[in-house]
Amino acid sequence: MKINFLKYLLTIASLGFALSVNAQSVTLLQQGNPTSIRGLSVVDDNIAWVSGSKGTIAITHNGGKTWDWQKVKGFETADFRDIEAFSDKEAVIMSSGTPALILKTIDGGANWRVKYRNADTAYFFDAMDFDSPKHGLVLGDPINGKFMLMETNNGGETWSPYKDPPDALPGEAAFAASGTCMRIVKGAIGISSGGTNTRFIYFNITLGSWQYDPLPIVHRKSSQGAFSFAMGSNGGLFVGGDYADDKKVDSVAAVALPKLDATLMYTPIKNGPMGFQSCIEYISGNTFFSTGTPGSNITTDGGKTWTKIDGTSFNVCRKAKRGKLVLLAGNGGKIGVLKL
């Protein structure tokens, strides 16, 4: 019964390319800008956007070599925790904090228009994802026992509450760490949570209902849980841990594999990433790449073994939607590129 989400997410296939284990490295491209970057969207091997604190946005047209920086006029104090870009002209940004904001540009960032605004302090946006240029969702922390979901069907021009948001347990929430605690593919929605409980929450299309699976990742504190997940061609990986104790290596990652009865089996990874990871991205084959404040890690066997390839602190890593470029971003305006 639970094969539906897996079936759709496992269709995220990238153009395969060979990986040289000894050649993997992270190269720093930018740093020194006083902004904390958590939003990153890589359109192709040339175009990418980042978003961060202090109303900061940047775009590259040459694969990250140079960046055009700006502060969104009128929103210089906003913390834009996530961004979704469709081209070098069109992008949507989401802010965390009060007011909750969604803005859009269609002219490369020259002008940004407010598409959603809510001054209610209960609203705190965590992540945004689109499965097509028209359809997207914004995830927020729970309100009255329900995760907050906003939906657009016209490319971010208008937003409405999702008709049937998933339930949340007391003290459970999502993390506005990298924009990857929620992903959607062809209507299938997945959410990784943390806090008092850490779960994989996903919408079963056949049943027309939400499914709730506990994850074997450290939880119980507000700083603990599953911060990010990614699905590949053979299974999925979840990463997180405790951002207040980022060197802790116990229960920071788990693998999800399909069983013979088409359900998902979640297994903790004993020898996983070297500490807290706020983001994970599927690369190709059985290769996943993750990053966090203690550094970046890679697995080429679906999570069985991991190699730490860099000790630089980053918040987010994303692969090109159309291409091979993998970028990273973090505090201090830091931007890096993964060399494979």
Image: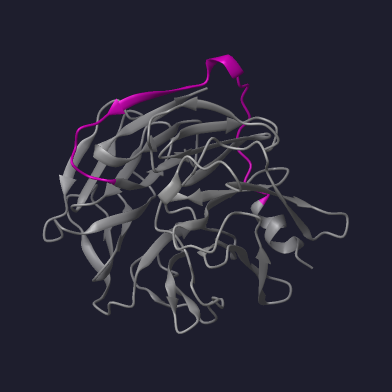
* Residue 150 in view here: no
Q: Nearer the viewer, residue 77 or 17?
A: 77
Question: On the image, which quarter does residue 289 sit in?
Answer: top right
Q: Nearer the viewer, residue 30 or 312?
A: 312
Residue 27 falls inside the magenta stretch: yes
Residue 257's spot in the image, x, y percent? 75, 50
Residue 144's spot in the image, x, y percent? 45, 84
* Residue 3 in view here: yes
Q: Relative to residue 130, is residue 319 depicted above or below?
A: above
Q: Nearer the viewer, residue 85 or 315?
A: 315
Magenta residues, dominant SS class: loop
Residue drawn at point x = 66 percent, y = 70 percent? 212
Residue drawn at point x = 52 percent, y = 20 percent? 24
Q: Relative to residue 168, is residue 107 depicted above or below?
A: above
Q: Residue pushed farthest bottom?
A: 144
Question: On the image, which quarter does residue 61 sit in?
Answer: top left
**Quick check: 265 left or right of 25?**
right
**Quick check: 264 left or right of 237?**
right
**Quick check: 56 left or right of 195?**
left
Residue 303's spot in the image, x, y percent? 67, 38
Image quadrant in which the N terminus is located? bottom right
Q: Which residues are magenta?
A: 10-36
Residue drawn at point x = 53 percent, y = 68 percent? 196
